[in-house]
Image (tube, helix red, strand yellow):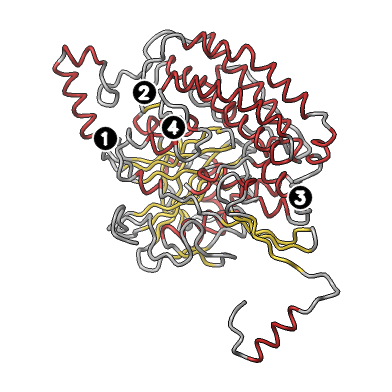
Amino acid sequence: MLPDSLRQHATAASVEAFDGEAVTGGNYDHNELTLEIAAVKISSICGFLKFDQGFARLSTVTAVDRYPAEPRFEVVYHLHSVEHNRRVRLKCRLSGTEPAIDSVTSVWRGANWYEREVFDLFGIQFRNHPNLKRIMMPDDWEGHPLRKDYPVTGSRV
Amino acid sequence: MGDRANPEQAAALAEEEKPQTGLRRMVLNMGPQHPSTHGVLRLVLELDGEIIRKCEPELGYLHTGIEKEFEVKNYQQAVTLTDRVDYLAPLSNNLGYCLSVEKLLGLEIPPKAQWMRVMLTELTRLNSHLVWLGTHALDIGAMTVFLYCFREREDILRVFEMFSGQRMMTSYFRIGGLALEPPRGWHERVKKFIDTFPSRVDEYENLLTSNPIWMARTQGVGRISLEDMLDLGVTGPMLRAAGLKIDARKDEPYSSYEKFDFEVPVRTESDVFARYLVRIEEMRQSAKIVRQAMDGMPEGPWKAADQHVVLPDREKMKTQMEALIYHFKIVTEGFRVPAGEVYLVIESPRGELGFYAVSDGTARPYRVHMRTPSFGNLQATAAMVEGAPIADVIASIGSMDFVLGDTDR
């Protein structure tokens, strides 16, 4: 459900009109619009925002680990519309056991490396990604360094 | 060669190694140690004669876990990490990070600090563009330009040293303002540099712009369409060289950029030559901004008045108990930042630099993600060089102006 206070924002209203069930929440803080999207809908919402709402650019994809809370992961997308000079943040929550979400590489090819980075550093799987392998860490690395239960220092050699 | 115990495998290998009459593809590893990649980037190129059929960049050789490190530093300490990301534009990174935390704090920065920040960030842009121009020209075979560019760069580094005591890892911008009071005599020093700089840019242009070898090596090389670039996440001068007038300093002004008068140069050819012309013009515009900031420098404090965030003056600490307590608190514990999240974008010399900062209300960042321009730009490498001769790879990747520290973080 889209909070009532967000209906005045054109982007939020259009997403709700497109698929009311996809929006699970949102807020408007520090002049930034955040929409929480059901993880299964991310690909279709991104397609709608790119092709119908002019969000031509995917600025970045990243994640936040809320360990030990559950759902543990937030996958965060920052979209940018050059045409309207507008930005929006999409957020999907994923459970800590076998986190997986659809890839948005079919919408923006540029999502490729960003999703690989999230996969590498957080261990989140992206379904239908064309080349999902580690990008920062060596291929034989164990663990995902940006998870909160991964030590900052330690005796890993 | 490998183990040939298996006779079938051995026969297959022998078959493969026979001289062939037709075309044969070769895989070439360019890098990770290669002078033209300026850092450690590996390009796996599949060649058909001289033509590149497939290109796969491999990165991560400079990954140092900076985003992880943010989570164990307090907010002010973490400024020093940002220098080390894009080490050719440390002050741009300082600025982006400080602005994002200040946005979370709702902190008002006095005009003098804002003007100072603009002036030094534009000098950083000059510094970064000079290194780019010098090394890019050197890669293509023009040695002289490199020496000229580094001569001017040295002047800029001396200015940084004067302000912060450091030539490269300045950490001069702090949350709440500047790290130190601007030094005596900075105005004359910057003025001396900026008075001569436009004529130096003319010198570079004399050497390159209508030089037939330079034109032959850069015109029509590394072409890529605007749609492809937007799709792949490219930003900055590369987009502007393809006809899109996009610049965060104009579109989403920060640190009082809206009060400065400058143009955003745009070309339409989208080749290596156009990117060169865009950056040359940007240098002239940056020099203009530096001059405006210098001449219009407001009077007043150079750090914010919030005593919970900004360290007190030395004098006050010696005379006021309260100031001493705040100093002790900030140094030992840091300051708490209200819970929330912001995504703040600035225009670094390479393009869109975004800081996604998440706070949980404590004195350390819960998560900081840096959307670095080099990472996005580098993703276009394959689209740019596939189908082109191998000799053009150097010119193409040079025109992207990436820094591997910025890519790998």
Residue sitting at x 46%, y 51%: B63
Tell me which label, 2 or 1, sits earlier in the chain.
2
In the rendered image, residues at marks 2 and 3 fall on the same chain: yes
Residue bearing mark 2: B179
Disc 2: host chain: B
Check if mark 2's residue and mark 3's residue have beta carbons within 8 Å: no
Tell me which label, 1 or 3, sits earlier in the chain.
1
| Crowd rating for badge 4 (residues with CA inside 10 Å; few <14, some 14–19, many 20+) | many
Residue type pointed to by label 3: Ala
Check if mark 2's residue and mark 1's residue have beta carbons within 8 Å: no
Q: Alpha-carbon distance for marks 2 and 1?
A: 19 Å
In the rendered image, residues at marks 4 and 3 fall on the same chain: yes
Q: Position of residue B208 (x, y in %)?
A: 77, 29
Q: Which mark is residue B336?
A: 1
Q: Alpha-carbon distance for marks 4 and 1?
A: 26 Å
The quadrant in which residue B309 appears is: top left
- Element under disc 3: helix
Q: Which mark is residue B169?
A: 4
The quadrant in which residue B361 appears is: top left
Residue type pointed to by label 2: Ala
Residue bearing mark 3: B391
Disc 1: host chain: B
Visible residue check, residue B193:
yes
